[in-house]
């Protein structure tokens, strides 16, 4: 699934609706664990539906395709299974792949489902987005921990999305100084040396040319702290100046190439074609949403 296509509609309003529905569904599920309702109570069919954790599902869809083995992404198995069962029910996924592992076969099946909805471009890249996941779950599962990229905004003359913008703002707060971008997101073909990683959302390059080694490392660490897969890139690695390439983990607008990089980051690699070891400051890996829950 390397084919790059375009456009993903903004569905911020839908996201809000989904978030509310997700909470309601979770409450209903929790309520069902209590004593049975009186016979007069209205039927609540949603109480029987499994709950899909969207954050865990999207994380698995980035990591699992990059694994050399069949290890499952922690906390994602039940959610991925529910998604795979729904894909199987639509004859898009063979039963033998319904295993809680969001590998390349499941990515391909999910992309086919997105195309069946009429989606194209980033919205049909096999990474679950809120609207496709909601549609897939109709009558089968409800969704919690809904995530999305938000609207596109301008930063220093470059296009990023609201989620990336908030992450950069928090990174700057941690550092105490402003970061200058050298490339933004949604930039197909803009920089050939980037190999498609900037085609989608969640990805930025930061200019570190005039920084000391220690400051470069501090910036990379701060970016990682808030949920970026971030690496210092030097001129010997490619036809580029010193910069930090950062891809926001769990941004549902990530290009396929950037999805692979966030998966590689989790697995301890450098995100380059040579598949080298991670050369950045190692800290516990978090997503932006997980960071926000603890800060
Ligand atoms: Zn880059």
Image: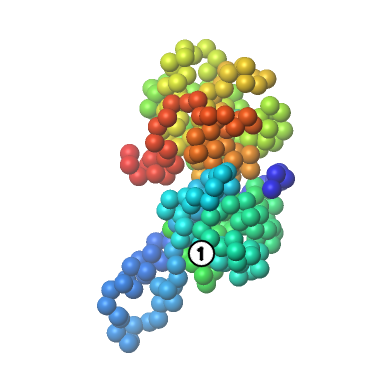
Taking the spot 47% from the left edge, 65% from the top edge, the residue there is 142
Q: Pinpoint residue 141: horizontal percent, then vertical percent.
A: 49, 67
Q: As drawn, which residue projects farthest toward the bottom? A: 39
Report which quarter residue 242 is drawn in.
Answer: top right
User: What is the total number of numbered labels drawn onto the structure image?
Assistant: 1
Can you tell me whether the CB of the residue at mark 1 lies under 8 Å from the nearest atom of ligand 1? Answer: no
Q: Is residue 210 above or below residue 117?
A: above
Residue 90 or residue 175, whichever sits in front: 90
Residue 173 or residue 290, whichever sits in front: 290
Q: Is residue 222 left or right of residue 201?
A: left
Residue 237 or residue 294, whichever sits in front: 237
Which quadrant of the rendered structure holds the C terminus? top left
Q: Is residue 65 above or below residue 20?
A: above
Q: As drawn, which residue projects farthest toward the left? A: 35
Q: Pinpoint residue 284: horizontal percent, then vertical percent.
A: 39, 36
Q: Is residue 201 left or right of residue 16?
A: right
Report which quarter residue 106 is drawn in.
Answer: bottom right
Q: Is residue 215 above or below residue 287?
A: above
Secondary structure of the residue carrying numbered label 1: helix
Q: Pinpoint residue 195: horizontal percent, then vertical percent.
A: 68, 32
- The residue that label 1 is drawn on is 82
Q: Pinpoint residue 185: horizontal percent, then vertical percent.
A: 60, 35
Q: As drawn, which residue projects farthest toward the front? A: 69
Taking the spot 44% from the left edge, 42% from the top edge, the residue there is 287
Visible in this render: residue 151?
no
Taking the spot 53% from the left edge, 51% from the top edge, the residue there is 70
Taking the spot 48% from the left edge, 26% from the top edge, the residue there is 280
């Amino acid at each position: 699934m390397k084919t790059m296509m375009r456009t993903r509609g903004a569905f911020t309003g839908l996201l809000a609706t989904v978030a509310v529905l997700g909470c309601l569904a979770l409450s209903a599920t929790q309520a069902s664990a209590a004593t049975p309702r009186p016979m007069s109570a209205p039927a609540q069919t949603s109480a029987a539906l499994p709950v899909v954790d969207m954050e865990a599902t999207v994380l698995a869809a980035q990591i699992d395709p990059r694994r050399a083995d069949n290890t499952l992404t922690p906390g994602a198995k039940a959610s991925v299974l529910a998604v795979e069962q729904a894909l199987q029910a639509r004859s898009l996924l063979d039963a033998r792949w319904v295993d809680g592992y969001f590998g390349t076969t499941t990515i391909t099946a999910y992309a086919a489902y997105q195309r069946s909805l009429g989606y194209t471009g980033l919205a049909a890249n096999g990474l679950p987005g809120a609207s496709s996941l909601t549609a897939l779950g109709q009558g089968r599962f409800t969704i919690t921990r809904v995530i999305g990229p938000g609207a596109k905004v301008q930063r220093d003359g470059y296009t990023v999305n609201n989620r990336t913008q908030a992450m950069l703002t928090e990174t700057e707060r941690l550092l105490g100084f402003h970061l200058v971008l050298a490339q933004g997101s949604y930039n197909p073909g803009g920089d050939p040396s980037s190999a498609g990683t900037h085609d989608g959302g969640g990805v930025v390059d930061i200019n570190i040319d005039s920084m000391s080694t220690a400051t470069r490392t501090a910036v990379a660490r701060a970016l990682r702290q808030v949920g970026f897969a971030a690496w210092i890139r030097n001129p010997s690695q490619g036809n580029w100046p010193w910069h930090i390439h950062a891809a926001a983990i769990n941004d549902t607008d990530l290009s396929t190439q950037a999805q692979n990089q966030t998966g590689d980051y989790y697995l301890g690699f450098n995100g380059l074609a040579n598949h080298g070891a991670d050369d950045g400051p190692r800290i516990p890996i978090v997503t932006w949403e997980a960071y926000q829950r603890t800060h």
